[in-house]
Image: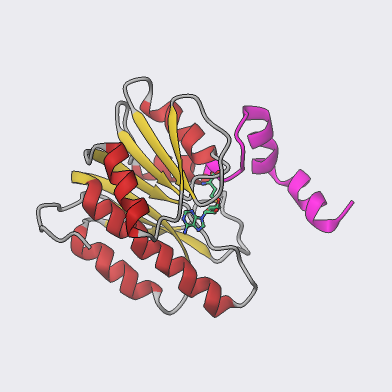
């Protein structure tokens, strides 16, 4: 058995995900963000970007209940989840962003992005690509969110992060940078948790 495999099997969140039917251990990162910030409510309309294999959408489905709606997007194909509208495409492309906007009807309470580039080990490159995905999530959120809506963006830490946080702060209040316990210590991912979309600025970029 490889070292990686052993680590996975010993990982409590990996085991819990298996027991509780989540497709990935990432579900617990979102659930821990939810426990701390209470960003998702019953009946909410949620857009889940970088959604495959689908554990965040699975967790969101339980939180929003039957009255809620979820639109999930990934660049990769995703196994269907009952009650979740799954789209495939690149979230940085304007035509795909237009598809998400059309599918959601533009009245969204939460935009989530757990999107991450395939990592190469070249830290600067991975960081820059992650920040690019972060800006794409912010652009989608500005087009879709109702005033008061919330946004969560996963980012790989690095020198361009403060500029992204600055942009998020122009549109949301409060904005926090958070690392849930389920995020491995050795991972350089962090989550921007932005609440209270100010809306109404007319800025749609
Ligand atoms: C960490 S995984 C997401 C895990 C997911 N939240 C879950 O709980 O199952 C990151 C995802 O981002 C997706 N991704 C990366 N770049 C993307 C892009 N440009 N557009 C859409 N999805 C993208 C990847 O295909 C990958 O499935």
Q: Is residue 126 left or right of residue 67?
A: right
Residue 121 point in image, percent of width and height? 65, 73
Residue 162 point in image, percent of width and height? 35, 74
Determine the image quadrant of residue 110.
top left
What's the colour scheme?
secondary structure
Residue 63 versus residue 157 in the image, above or below: above
Residue 59 versus residue 111 in the image, above or below: above
Residue 15 shown in magenta: yes
Residue 24 shown in magenta: yes
- Name the one closer to the observer, 24 or 50: 50
- Name the one closer to the observer, 38 or 76: 76
Which residue occupies the extreme front position in the image? 95
Which residue occupies the extreme right position in the image? 1
Q: Residue at x 33, y 41 (%)?
A: 39
Q: Residue at x 54, y 45 (%)?
A: 52
- Name the one closer to the observer, 121 or 179: 121
Q: Residue at x 41, y 44 (%)?
A: 48
Residue 194 point in image, percent of width and height? 30, 54
Magenta residues: mostly which secondary structure? Answer: helix
Magenta segment: 1-28
Residue 73 visible, this orientation = yes
- Name the one closer to the observer, 184 or 4: 4
Residue 40 versus residue 202 in the image, above or below: above
Q: Is residue 86 left or right of residue 202?
A: right
Residue 157 visible, this orientation = no
Which residue occupies the extreme top position in the image? 66
| Figure disc tally | 0
Residue 119 point in image, percent of width and height? 61, 66
- For the C terminus, the image quarter is bottom left
Residue 11 versus residue 42 in the image, above or below: below
């Amino acid at each position: 058995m490889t070292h990686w495999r052993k680590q996975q099997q010993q990982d409590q969140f990996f085991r819990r995900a298996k027991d509780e039917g989540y497709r990935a251990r990432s579900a617990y990162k979102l659930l821990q963000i939810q426990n701390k910030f209470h960003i998702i409510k019953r009946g909410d309309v949620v857009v889940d970007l970088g959604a495959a294999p689908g554990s965040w959408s699975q967790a969101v489905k339980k939180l929003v209940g039957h009255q809620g709606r979820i639109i999930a997007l990934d660049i990769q194909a995703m196994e269907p989840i009952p009650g979740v509208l799954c789209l495939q495409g690149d979230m940085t492309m304007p035509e795909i962003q237009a598809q998400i906007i059309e599918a959601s009807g533009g009245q969204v309470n939460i935009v989530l992005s757990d999107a991450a580039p395939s990592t190469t080990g070249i830290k600067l490159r991975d960081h820059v690509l992650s920040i690019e995905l972060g800006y794409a999530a912010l652009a989608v959120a500005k087009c879709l969110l109702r005033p008061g809506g919330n946004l969560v963006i996963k980012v790989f830490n690095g020198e361009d992060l403060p500029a992204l946080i600055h942009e998020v702060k122009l549109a949301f209040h409060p904005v926090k940078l958070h690392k849930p316990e389920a995020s491995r210590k050795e991972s350089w991912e962090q989550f921007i948790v932005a609440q209270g979309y100010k809306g109404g600025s007319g800025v749609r970029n």
